Image: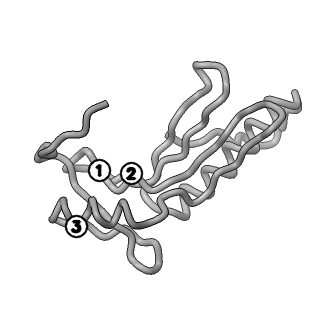
């Protein structure tokens, strides 16, 4: 995958402040520098026996000029193809809650247990 030298005008760039809150930046070189110098992964859970990994990280880019900026992403890897999915979130708090819901759902799927009282499905 090639990186683009000049980002499209519809992309907005963000970094995190000291409290992990997104702050928009308007200089792409400042954004690139910040992204390369900071840890972007906030939580990674490996379910060793199944080979499934759930990772929540900061994306730092929003590809829309309207609506909520989904700057954090939780990805599922290691499942069968249709179950490898990504879910966006606007804040770190929501992303980490989403990570836990996804993890619980996968554990139930892998162990064959179901919870009829509540649905922990991630919200798109």
Instruction: Sort mark 2 into few (<14), some (14-19) or many (20+) by Cα contacts within 10 Å.
Output: some
Q: Residue at x 35, y 61 (%)?
A: 35
Q: Residue at x 72, y 44 (%)?
A: 46
User: Where residue 2 appears, x then y in whole percent?
Assistant: 26, 33
Q: Which residue is mark 2?
A: 70
| Residue 24 occupies quadrant | bottom left
Q: Which residue is mark 3?
A: 30
Q: Which label's residue is closer to the chain start, 3 or 2? A: 3
Q: Which residue is mark 1?
A: 62
User: Where residue 20 appears, x then y in whole percent?
Assistant: 46, 72
| Residue 102 occupies quadrant | top right
Q: Residue at x 53, y 57 (%)?
A: 41
Task: Mark 2 and mark 1 in contact? Answer it, CB < 8 Å.
Answer: yes
Instruction: Sort mark 1 into few (<14), some (14-19) or many (20+) by Cα contacts within 10 Å.
Output: many
Viewer-nearest residue: 52 or 67: 52
Describe the element under mark 2 as helix, strand or loop: loop
Q: Residue at x 18, y 59 (%)?
A: 28
């Amino acid at each position: 995958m090639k990186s683009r030298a000049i980002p499209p005008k519809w992309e907005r760039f963000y970094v995190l402040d000291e409290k992990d809150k997104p702050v928009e930046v308007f200089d792409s070189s400042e954004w690139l520098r910040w992204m390369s110098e900071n840890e972007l992964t906030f939580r990674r859970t490996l379910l060793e026996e199944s080979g499934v990994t759930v990772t929540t990280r900061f994306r730092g880019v929003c590809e829309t000029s309207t609506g909520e900026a989904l700057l954090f992403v939780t990805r599922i890897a290691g499942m069968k193809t249709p179950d490898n999915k990504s879910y966006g979130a606007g804040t770190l708090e929501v992303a980490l809650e989403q990570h836990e819901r996804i993890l619980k759902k996968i554990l139930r799927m892998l162990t064959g247990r179901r919870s009829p009282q509540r649905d922990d499905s991630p919200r798109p």
